[in-house]
Image: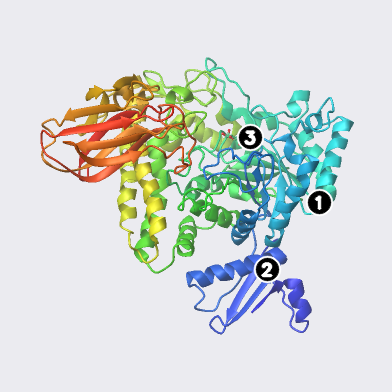
Amino acid sequence: MIVGTIDQYNHAFPHAPLNLSFSGDGFSLRTQGNGKVVRIVGHNERGALYGAFEYLSRLAQGTLSSNVDYTTSPSAPIRWTNEWDNMDGSIERGYAGNSIFFENGAVLANLSRVTQYARLLASIRVNAVVVNNVNADPATLESNNINGLGRIADAFRPYGIQLGLSPYFASPVNISGLPTYDPLDSRVIAFWQNKTDEIYKRIPDMAGYLVKASSEGQPGPLDYNRTLAQAANLFAKAVKPYGGLVMYRGFIYDATYDKADWTADRAKGAVDYFNGLDGKFDDNVVVQIKYGPVDFQVREPASPLFSHLPSTSMALEVEVSQEYLGQQCHLAYLPPLWKTVTDFDLRINGTSSRVRDIITNKRFKHPSRLGGSAAVVNVGQNSTWLGSHLAMSNLYAYGRLAWNWESDETEILQDWVRLTFGRRDPHLMNTITQMSLASWPAYENYTGNLGTMTITDIYTHFGPNPQRRESKTSGTWLRADEKSIGMDRTVWNGTGPGTGFARQYPDEVYQMYEDLENTPDNLLLWFHHVPYTRRLHSGETVVQHFYNAHYSGAQTAADFVRMWQSLHGSADLDEERYQEVLFRQVFQAGHALVWRDAIVNWLHNVSGIPDDLGRVGHHPWRIEAESMLLDGYKPYAVDPFEAASNSTAIVTSTNTTVGRASVILPQRFTSGVYNLAVNFFDMLGGNSTYEVSVNNCTVATWTADWQDTGKLGHAPSIYIDAHSATRITFPGIKVRNGDRLSIVGTPSGIEPAPLDYISLLPVGVVD
Ligand code: GCV
């Protein structure tokens, strides 16, 4: 076995030098003699390492039985991850425990997880990690932290990973006490040069800076009427002598919009702010652009900014952390979503201009040859890295796609399954493949149809809350009134002007989106404000599509449980992972119902249009808690109303009173075996306990501690709302007609043992 760089190889074998056509971090892998002779040659050291990982991967997957001989090179040099870790150890939009980098304002003493992470990332060919939050803390770059950052870089280095940093734009004021952070002020320029010199002294291979400025309340150049390019170039000049890069984020929009103004539109922000700046960035600046114009939503059109910077290097930003996509408590395999953008053809100047060709510099051929992608990952101390075993397919796939955005998402997934679980059980392979490929469409079905984006709360980003999306200043309105829904983003819709966002696309794309008839159904409400009764290309009306999609999506989430259960005992699945995934799938199935009911009830309420199939509001197997005989419990009107079945929950009358709710089972519950489901609210700040009994015989008990103990890492809620709404199920409960069913709730902390309803479901019924 030979492993080395091409230079090392040719030095060692001067009589038979290799002439391989590869570039960047590329490598060549050749095996001969049925795998007995192995030659791994990298274009550089990183390439040699990647080749070694590729060899191990193929060995593990059993795909080296015959001889192989191939060379591969990355489609782009930038294959970074971004971690939004704070110095106190918390992680913004992280759902897997605390930071592996920081704690209590400093770098962790023990960086063994960092070494493991570097190894993991190298195996998927990621080459740099920005370790601190883009909402940066000035303390990160203070002198007393530089050595700590250097230790992280030391842990990364053997794996070919470079460290990147997010600077706080106003640091000249915060760190040095200067009266200004104006990017053109000579004292500010000197500050950043000195700071950068100090960092490079300890970390000579620092990858560069990732800059969020004048965005979401962050200080930035606009505070001094300077341009984004002037800000980017400030940092670019400082890192240039060291070969560093500046990733300048395109995520910029006004903080407040006026809902009364139908031309106001957050989606237009990036293109407006970058207007006139193409060609004004230094050649080591790369503009890093989120896939959609808003913010990592369940579906968005490709960001039009990709078509506005032909003379500037660009990179795509995706999010592995499932911020708006179920926060790793819902399964969502994301490459099919990312590909709706990377495969999208922007038709710039009427020629093929796929986003993947723009970010890999094939389309514009920028002389700096920069470009690529960054993924916000936000791994934590949880032993699974992301809090969920299955969520890791997204990180694996990101690495594979960043190398080559044309790779097939199903093949990537199946490689991941073989590497993660094994290759003995074809049923396991088929099941995880089916679940993963069905997961994003299902999530879209129950959270954000027809281009509305995820109809979630605008802060927590987890459970449904259409009202918050409609709030005055959110800028991401649904604009749902009693007759119609959708953002009119056209220039002129026939009766009046829209926001004009569609005009930010090159002509052919603009014409498609401007025209109601030509807009694809899945982005209809992104671009147009239409009556609920409008017929889609699919033949359904808008409102009926919502109803159908929500029922279908929730059914798929329920099917995932059954599919996962069919893997119990598989030769490729240990009990621990089986149980941990099962727990999350059961949670997802329950929360998908919370989503389904919330959105269909809300829509029914605003539109007044009934579901053709009579499902909305019809729950024959449910018993509302507030309709039971209450002792120590009282009804509670939930806000938003759609977060609870029938808008009402029950809570204990004080935070120390034990509550009891009971009911004699009505006639419709004939004697038999049912699945018992209880919908309750698991709030942060208390671990209430519950006990269900049938005729005084206990059939189920549990503690609502999933938030407080971090069993589910999603953004917590201290309220009775759609984030805390949770379902627990107990299969095989025997009841006889006329039995008394009781539930006793013991409050804890701020949590008054809240209950929404119970369902006794005949086997196979999802509701
Ligand atoms: C780091 C969204 C997220 C913020 C994030 C921001 C960004 O708004 O909700 O948490 O801030 O995007 O990407 O900068």
**In the displayed structure, does residue 153 sit left or right of residue 498?**
right
Residue position for label 2? 48
Q: Quadrant of the C terminus?
A: top left
Answer yes or no: disc 3 within 8 Å of ligand 1: yes
- Is mark 2 in CB contact (under 8 Å) with mark 3? no
Residue 251 bears which disc, if any?
3
Instruction: Give me the residue at 89% from left, 32% from top.
Output: 186
Under mark 1, the amino acid is Arg
Under mark 2, the amino acid is Ala
Residue 518 image offset from top left, x and y in percent: 45, 35
Task: Give the alpha-carbon distance from disc 1 to disc 3, as whole Å.
Answer: 30 Å
The image quadrant in which ligand 1 is located: top right
**In the displayed structure, does residue 721 sit left or right of residue 227?**
left
- State whether residue 353 appears in this view: no
Under mark 3, the amino acid is Phe
Instruction: Give me the residue at 37% from left, 53% from top.
Output: 579
Question: Mark 2 or 3 closer to N-term?
Answer: 2
> From the viewer's perspective, is the residue at label 1 or at label 2 nearer?
1
Answer yes or no: disc 2 within 8 Å of ligand 1: no
Q: Is residue 426 above or below residue 519?
A: below
Residue 46 image offset from top left, x and y in percent: 69, 63
